[in-house]
Amino acid sequence: MKRYVATRVATMFGVLMITLLITISLVGSNMDTILKQGIVFQVRAEITENPAIADSFSSVEEFETFVQNQIDQRHKILGLDEPWYSPQRIGFTMYKILLLDFGHATFLTSDEGSSDVKDIIFEKLPRTILLFTTATVIISIIGIFLGALSASKVGSMIDRITSSFAIISSSFPVWWIGMLMIFLFSFTYQIFPARATPDIPSSDPEYIGSLLYHMALPLITIVMIGFGSWAYLVRNFMVGIMQEDFIMAKKTIGVNQKKIIYTHALKNAAPPIVTILALSLSGSLGGAIITEAVFDWPGMGRLYFEAITVMDLPVIVGATYILTVFFLISIFIADLLYGYFDPRVRTGQ
Amino acid sequence: MSSISPQEIKQEFLKSKMGIAGIIILSILIATSIIAIITIPVETFQEWNNPGSWISYPKVAIPIWVNYFMTEKIPEHKIYDTPNIQTNSNGEIILTSHQFGVNFDYESFPNDFIYIFSSEYVDSPLLQMSVIRPDGIKLELLSMALPYTNSKTIHSERIFSTDNAINKNLSLQSEKFSFNLDRLSTEDIVFSKSKINEPLKGNYIFLIDTYSINSKPEIHESQLIIGGKAFGIMGTDELRRDLAVGLLWGTPLALFIGLVVSIASVVAGLLYGVYAGFKGKKTDEAMMRFNDVIYALPALPFLIILSVTISNSIFVMVGFLMVFGWVGIAKVARSMSLQIKTKGYVDAANMMGQKDSKIVLKHILPQLLPYAFASVAISVPAAITTEAGLSFLGLGDPSFPTWGQILHDANTFGAASRGLWWWIMPPGIMIAITGLAFVFIGNALDAIVNPKLKR
């Protein structure tokens, strides 16, 4: 088991590093260009603010060399004189990111007005977790019970309805259903707000109530689209297990059907179910990008979307890193749980 | 894993209602794509983002079939481009008359009317526009001289109903109406009953007469547009684009994306997994660690970064989707090949000294084919929805009207808040139907390949 955990940890760390490296190499050159432009603006602004500097030069060339020197000096301080792909700079950037130091955002700010990427991300993250964890928990509870129910009555009305609902709902994109829900329940019948961002400041005591009210429509949409495929998944696992010999034996002894399903069968279906639960929790974080953009839910997904629209690279790098970390942690937990439930995995059979 | 012969699979498949439904939907989609490719010229969809080519269409028009369900008919947007042409010459003066018969049968006034023409002439011909209404009244709308030239030139112009001259001309004929014409727009007067200001149904004739001296003007283009609020089978969007064109062209694009991505990822995943499983030991370990790395990359954020930084061309996007598509299949293929490897005939082939590549291709891969077909079918919807999602975020290829792209535009122009259901519903339904076809086929195949699911 120790060896198993150790290899998993090593793989995860490796993946994290590779993700970082890929992200940095994808945005690195753009990031440098943006930083350099910022410096040029800064230098020019300082000179226009202080006319004495410009007056002290006799020729245009002299003035231009002075400006260039100023710019070069600042490049050197920030280490921009070396290309972004030089090992020192990549190493340094990765080290900083590992310590959650993402620098300052170019355009975006948190609700409090801080432009520190860390502040922005840690303000948005809880909201995404709130929405998607709640949704996933509701989905899995409905899914497990519905799945177990239809597995106990294979071929029945409930089973057929669940299966066809699962198949149909899985081919609809969540965000499209989201658009329809907004169309129906925000504009045609004005029950829920169209924009999921609460309109009162977060210091207000009524904020939580408002947040929950604004959360309702996205939550309903995600649950509606999600629970079908969960039920179908659980059903298929259960049907498989119900054919195993030990269940057959229980049946022949005369153990009651309900007891078999909810204790013996469900227990044996647990490992894959728990694994998928862990994976879908993290998967929902990635899927949040589009869903949050549709509902305008003020979480990580929308932050990511906004950062891309204005090309705010430090935020993109930071958000990708945090998403990857969450994704990896849940994969790791899923792996450990699977290894715990199913000893064959651990020993590498 | 028991091996199933292709004949058995075919038989079982034809028994499954779901599989047949999937095949039927898929063939309809393929037929639609073929129709789209044949009937809509490629140029039309390349002009998708060129506002100039859609100018004669109405803004956010509802589909015309809605009128079948309405008691009060919504005026249709009509484009008449085949006028009835008559030429008379009286001595030096030549009269060219273009007549458009307009059947107006709606409860509300049209939005506007536009006459578009381009003609080649010398000198300065006179253009007169008038309309004969169903009640016999003839209204003079406009009389103007075309700009003078002394050599043959082509002159194109659009005459809008909002033209001040038309308004002035109508107010001079106000005695034909028994209500006050002030502040009424021209179309509300021209199409109005003479007693009260209500739409007058019936056949109108729009006359455009061109008088010229000595030489007959050559009219290249002559179009009358009666602006309405309903147009085409699928309506139009804010940028006046015919949504039917976008939806039709979206079908081959979606099928292309879905099939290419899933087939390529399944093939790559199969080869990778089978080879890793077959080789075993260090190779297997190394290959599976690499697989873990790709598996652990968060796909959507990466796809977004890649499309922003590298390219958002649809073909590059297909490549990116493949990068993330093969991983899961490789895992399953590996475990399957671990089982097959232990079978006697593989050992035998090995002992006979057959090459690894031959054993993999000839003895192991064929066993996995049923599973491969099921995975292709199952992974198509994911590819289509991911591409649609990226397009929806505005990261797609803007030069192709994919369904996601249409939905992106709908969202940008606030279609949901404005109640423009015909802009939101059809693209999503198309995505879902396409997904459904493949899910049906995939599930039917899966049920045959995985006997555990059967019962």
Image (cartoon, coloured by chain):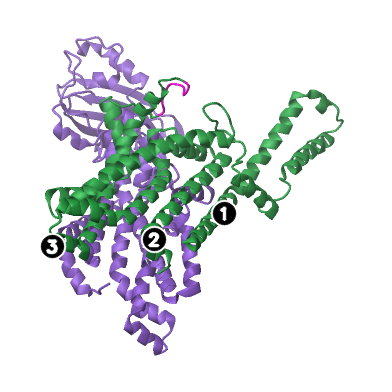
Chain colours: A green, B purple
Residue B429 occupies quadrant:
top left
Q: Are marks 1 and 2 in contact (CB under 8 Å)?
A: no
Q: Which of the marked residues, 3 or 1, is nearer the chain's N terminus? A: 1
Residue B267 in percent (x, y) is at 38, 67
Query: How many other residues sit within 10 Å of disc 1, few (<14), some (14-19) or many (≥20)?
Result: some
Q: Nearer the viewer, residue B62 or B155?
A: B62
Q: Comparing marks 2 and 3, which lies closer to the viewer?
A: 3
Q: Nearer the viewer, residue A95 or B353?
A: A95
Q: Residue at x 17, y 63 (%)?
A: A248
Q: Is residue A235 above or below residue B448?
A: above
Which residue type does callout 2 highlight? Gly
- Judged left or right of residue B306, residue A239 is left
Numbered badge on residue B328: 2
Give the CA distance from mark 3 to mark 1.
Answer: 55 Å
| Residues drawn in magenta | A197-203
Q: Is residue A200 above or below residue B103?
A: above
Identify the secondary structure beneath mark 2.
helix
Give the CA distance from mark 2 to mark 3.
Answer: 39 Å
Q: Are marks 3 and 1 in contact (CB under 8 Å)?
A: no
Chief secondary structure of the magenta span? Answer: loop
Numbered badge on residue A252: 3
Chain ID, mark 2: B
Provide the residue designation for mark 1: A17
Residue B346 in percent (x, y) is at 35, 82
Q: Residue at x 32, y 50 (%)?
A: B249
Residue A148 in percent (x, y) is at 22, 50
Q: Is residue B10 above or below residue A293?
A: below
